[in-house]
Each structure stands twice: as structure tokens, then as C-alpha cells.
Image (cartoon, rainbow, N blue to C red):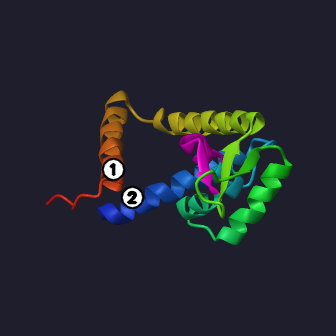
Amino acid sequence: MTTLESGALLREVVRRYVQSQRQALACDADMLSTTRCHILTELKRAGQLSQQNLASRLNLEKSWVSRVVEQMVGDGLLSKAPSTTDKRAVELTLTADGLSRAQSLEALLNGHGESVLARLTAAQRADVNTALQALLQALTSPSEPQP
């Protein structure tokens, strides 16, 4: 494999990781669509979100999210309630079944990540963990890049 510049290397790692994640999920007969998985994980992280906020977090059209949310409400994974602060908004939460599915999904995804990292030596895993922590901070920090 050719040596890639850092930006291209990061994109290639993310691309291959997402592909392998999707293959791991495809092995689970009870798995949901990618959009449904994202909705479950976002609501598990947040606890409760407005439908508009959810669409924004997922970078998806509100109408698309609305359709999927209605299906997930019908499947008993989500509940909808009018917002107490904005009469135009709808608040979404996971039902008990939705939370259970989100927890199972999280365990599956975390297990997949651990299986990928298990292919590395202990020293490499420590280096990768340090680099991932730095990347996470860089992606969540509003500060300017360091020279």
C-alpha cells in the first residue's frame, strides 16, 4: 500500500472502518437500516431530542427523518410527545424496546471496534488510543488548529 498524506489516510481509515462496521451489522439478522441505527444511537446519547434537532445532528432532511421516525414509533422503538417549551416541536425518546435495541447496537459496534484493535500489538493499541483521544478533542473543540 502506498503512503498516504495524513488527511487522505484518515479518510481511508474511516472509509474502511465504516465498511467493516456495515459488514458486521449485516451479519445480525435483527439489525436495522443505517438511518435507524443512527437515530437509536443519537437518542441513546442525548436521552431526548426534538425531531428538528435530530435531523440537524444527522445532517438529514427533516421530511426523511419524519418518515423514519413515524415508522420507528409504529415499531415501538420511539415515543413522540409535544415539546413543553415549543408548541411547534416534537420531542423524541427511546421506548424500553428502543433503549434495549440501542444498547445491543452499541455493544455490537463497540465489540467490532475492539476486534479491529485486537489485531494490533499492545503498544500500537496504546498509540492508537492516544491518537483517537486527540482526534476526538480536535473534532469537538472550537479552538483553532495548533501549528
Q: What x and y, as percent, mark residue 125?
A: 37, 34
Q: Residue at x 23, y 58 (%)?
A: 143
Give how far across and how far down residue 82 sits, in percent.
70, 53
Residue at 29%, 46% in the rendered image? 134
Please tell me whether residue 53 is drawn above or below residue 42 in the rendered image. below
From the viewer's perspective, tell me whether residue 143 is left or right of residue 105: left
Q: Nearer the viewer, residue 89 or 143?
A: 89
Magenta residues, start to end: 40-50
The answer to whether the residues at label 2 and label 1 have Cβ atoms under 8 Å apart is yes
Looking at marks 2 and 1 on the same chain, the residue that comes earlier in the sequence is marked by 2
Query: Could you say which is closer to the camera, residue 80 or residue 4?
Result: 80
For the view shown, which residue lies furthest in the right direction?
74
User: CA separation, marks 2 and 1?
Assistant: 10 Å
Residue 107: image x %, image y %?
Answer: 62, 33
Secondary structure predominantly adopted by residues drawn in magenta: helix
Determine the residue positioned at 72% across, 50% down.
81
Residue matched to label 1: 135
Secondary structure found at label 2: helix
x, y percent for residue 40: 66, 46
| Residue 56 in view of the camera | yes
**What numbered label is drawn on residue 10?**
2
- Nearest the viewer among 139 and 69 is 69
Q: Amino acid at mark 2?
A: Leu
